[in-house]
Image: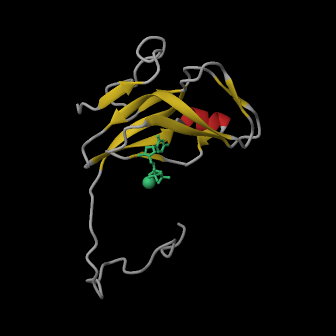
Amino acid sequence: MKQIELKILDARIGKEFPLPEHATAGSAGMDLRACIDQPMIIQSGETQLIPTGIAIHIADPNLAATILPRSGLGHKHGIVLGNLVGLIDSDYQGPLMVSCWNRSENAFTLEAGERLAQLVFLPVVQATFEVVDSFESSDRGEGGFGHSGKL
Ligand SMILES: O=c1ccn([C@H]2C[C@H](O)[C@@H](COP(=O)(O)OP(=O)(O)OP(=O)(O)O)O2)c(=O)[nH]1
Ligand SMILES: [Mg+2]
């Protein structure tokens, strides 16, 4: 288990609202909570930036975190992310925010402390580019974007 530094930015975190954690032994994500003062109505089509009440400093350049939607909220209520996926850089130290997009036709009430997205840590490989004139040929070559058909 990797230790990541976390700053509590809202006094309710760790008390009223639990710290993010892996809910089960096999959970890939940790749910993030809406650190808002009262229920917030997100109108159909609207996007709101929601604080999570925490900051993290991943520090290790070979790690990143992603913010992903929760499947239940996304599928049943159309509550997804305004940026589709949030990417948290290892050197970011600011407040962790969730861009919350209501892509449904109905207004959604986000409750204070509600779990609205999930944080997933991933390994990262940083690269530099080596400019070449040609590539050694591969099985795929330049085929892409569905060139192999649908079935
Ligand atoms: O859903 C998100 C996405 C990003 N961030 C923070 C962490 C991330 O490291 C930083 C910058 O994100 P990104 O590089 O995706 O945004 P940008 O538009 O390129 O901003 P910048 O110019 O600050 O890099 O914003 C969040 O808190 N939540
Ligand atoms: Mg950036």
- Residue 11 in percent (x, y) is at 45, 15
Looking at the picture, tell me which residue is in the foreground, 128 or 22.
128
User: Seen in the image, is 50 located left or right of residue 64?
Assistant: right
Question: Residue pushed farthest bottom?
Answer: 133
Place of residue 127 in the rendered image (x, y in percent of width and height, measured from the top left): 27, 63
Residue at the spot 33% in from the left edge and 28% down from the top edge: 6
Tell me which corner region of the image, top left, top right, bottom left or bottom right, holds residue 18: top left
The quadrant of the image that shows the N terminus is top left
* Residue at x 48% of width, y 74% of height: 148
Q: Is residue 84 visible?
A: yes
The reply, left or right, for residue 133 in relation to residue 113 is: left
Q: Residue at x 60, y 19 (%)?
A: 37
Residue 22 visible here: no
Ligand 2's quadrant is bottom left
Q: Name the outermost residue toward the top.
A: 15
Q: Nearer the viewer, residue 40 or 75?
A: 40
Residue 128: percent from left, percent from top: 27, 68
Quadrant position of residue 22: top left
Q: Is residue 114 above or below residue 130?
A: above
Residue depicted at x 32% and y 78%: 139
**Residue 111: x and y, percent?**
62, 21
Please name the colour scheme applied to the rendered image: secondary structure
Above or below — where is 38 with respect to 148?
above
Name above or below for residue 103 compared with residue 96.
Answer: below
Counting the numbered discs, the total is 0
